[in-house]
Image: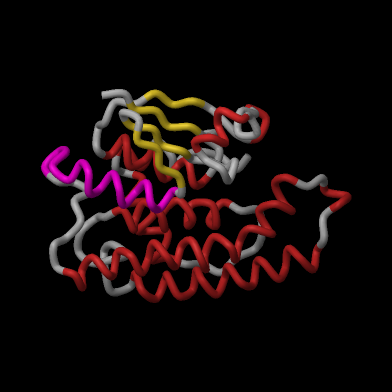
Amino acid sequence: MTRRLWGRASSGNVQKAIWALEELALPYEHIEAGGTHGIVGEARYQAMNPNGLVPTLEEDGFVLWESNAILRYLAQAHADALGGVLALPENPRERALIDQWLDWQATAFTPAMRDAFLQLVRVAPEKRNADVIEASRAASERCAAMLDRHLAGTPYVAGERFSIADIAVGCAAHRWLILPFDKEERPNVVAWRDRLAQRPAGSSVLTLPLT
């Protein structure tokens, strides 16, 4: 089987796909794309992914983009890998909880911290907008507080078992935890992130710096 993952490893969305592929021990070729690596603006790439974004997964001619769609696909298409480590539950309510947290990461947590990330990591200090940073910090704090309260009563975000929801939210939480701004202590988030980092596949992305 030919399997390729396109996207720069510094991207949080690409990191989700890398983590899942490593968790499943699936062989793949990783092609750096986006940012300084270019490629995403080329016609051949946009023929695969018309958004010109990353990641894009190629598997024996099948092409898929959107990181959480890639997570769902890998969990379903390779449900038997390594004893079903990422297999989705058959119970529709249990599966709905995974979907709930995948959507929350994509629509709430990551968007909340995006402006602070861009300002503090990608913008020169003299050009930063303090009001934009503070608004983003406050929004991401609200998300982190909610996640911390939730994790006080469960070992993983969608229940008792590690799932692709932990991959998606875990990558976002890692970024939030290492963003260089003042934040409230969130002991449950930290303890959960540290548990995820003990997984060999998790440590491959949860140790990466912000770039």
Q: Main secondary structure of the magenta part?
A: helix
Residue 68 part of the magenta segment? yes
Image coordinates of residue 192 in percent, x first then y, are 35, 58
Side of 74 where 31 appears, left or right = right
In the rendered structure, which segment of residues is drawn in magenta?
A: 67-83
- What residue is at 28 percent from the left and 66 percent from the top? 158
Q: Residue at x 49, y 40 (%)?
A: 55
Q: Is residue 89 left or right of residue 49?
A: left
Q: Quadrant of the N terminus?
A: top left
Q: In the image, residue 26 lies at what x, y percent?
A: 26, 31
In-front residue for pair 83/72: 72
Give the answer, above or below, for where 57 lies relative to 104: above
Residue 211 % position (x, y): 63, 39
In the rendered view, would you say 207 is above or below 96? Answer: above
Viewer-closest of 82 and 37? 37
Please report the residue visible at 39 percent of the width from the left and 76 percent of the height from the top: 149
Q: Is residue 61 above or below residue 14?
A: above
